[in-house]
Amino acid sequence: MSILQGLPPTTDLGDGITQIRLPMAGNPMRYINGYLVENDDGPALIDCGWKADDVFAALEAGLASCGYAIRDVRRLLVTHFHMDHYGLAGRLLAAGVPEMAMHAQDWEVLEEREQIDEDAVIDAWLARNGLHVEPEDDDQYQRYDLAKPTRLIEDGEKIGRLRALWTPGHSPGHLCFVDAVSGRTFTGDHVLDPVTPHVGLWVDVERDPLGEYVRSLHAVGALETSGALPAHGEAFPDLARRVEELLAHEATREAAVLHALDDGPRTAAEVAAMLRWRARGDRFDDLPSAYQQFAVAETLAHLEHLREGGTVGRRDDADAIRWERVSR
């Protein structure tokens, strides 16, 4: 069976919007949506898939079904820097797309990656938090070429029929796009249904990604919108309802993280081991290694958010970082 499992390669969503499903071979998400949006000055493409020949071919075929070639795309709008959203950007610029735009904070992340051994930094950070990761020679997270944006998008900026909304959390520079024509919102990875977007703390920085995410959720939930067009999965009509579900999920998880510290200080990995993961409630020890890393990073985001709120403290011991409840 096709990776799309019976879904068509493209769907006309009306109002000059076409959903192009781009394959993610080997990934449980199966596909990412590129959205072709008609504008007076030419079509815009929101997100482009990771760097792979099958993705490029699927994008070419999707554009052709709308009567376009790659070179006809006026601009590429990147919701955030992750490879499945940004990966083909360099190839598209080389193929004739004149403009590629993203938020400055995500471009800064990509530039910083070029200066460090990111895998080593992440592995060391996770180890300090109780999870020892065996180094792997795996290029699955390198499916992109570094391509400098021709334009940096600011919060509230209008780009044709779209208005950019800065929604940090999943990434520092994540963007949603509100469509003035259809009334719908392109939510990127900020709001997905039924998947819960990942918000993690992967390096030791002074940042509260979960706090950013919660504030951004409230901003999106307050929009007057006729529906959501997410980067993964299918369109859904009630964005405010899904925002409330995600806020409730984060509150429930936060309470569980705090409860895990009732008996004394623990590393983030020890806290993660006391929680249940994925929709089916898997035990931490039953997760594959990569999922364990995501689980610890997510736990760290919650712990840092609780520390920002004054209910949890961080203790940097010689052998590890431990987190503890703070008496109030």
Image: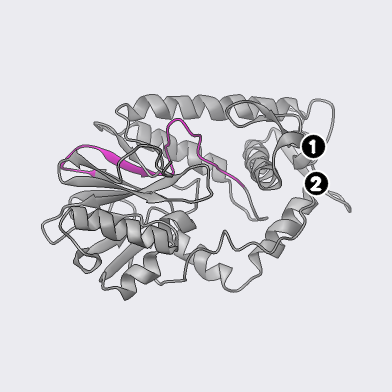
Q: Position of residue 33 (x, y in %)?
A: 35, 47
Residue under circle 1?
270
Numbered range of the magenta stretch: 179-200
Assign the N terminus to one quadrant of the image: top left
Residue 241 magenta-highlighted: no
In which quadrant is the C terminus drawn? top right
* Nearer-N-terminus badge (1/2): 2
Mark 1 nearby-residue class (10 Å; few <14, some 14–19, many ≥20): some
Residue at (48% x, 29% y) in the render: 246
Name the mark on residue 26.
none
- Amino acid type of the residue that numbered disc 1 sits on in the rendered structure: Glu
Front residue of this view, candidates 327 and 8: 8
Q: Is residue 9 left or right of residue 213?
A: left
In the picture, measured across the screen, residue 61 lies left or right of residue 27, that is: left
Question: What scheme was used to colour the molecule?
Answer: one colour
Tell whether 124 sits left or right of 320.
left
On the image, numbered disc 2 is attached to which residue?
A: 130
Q: As drawn, which residue projects farthest toward the right?
A: 318
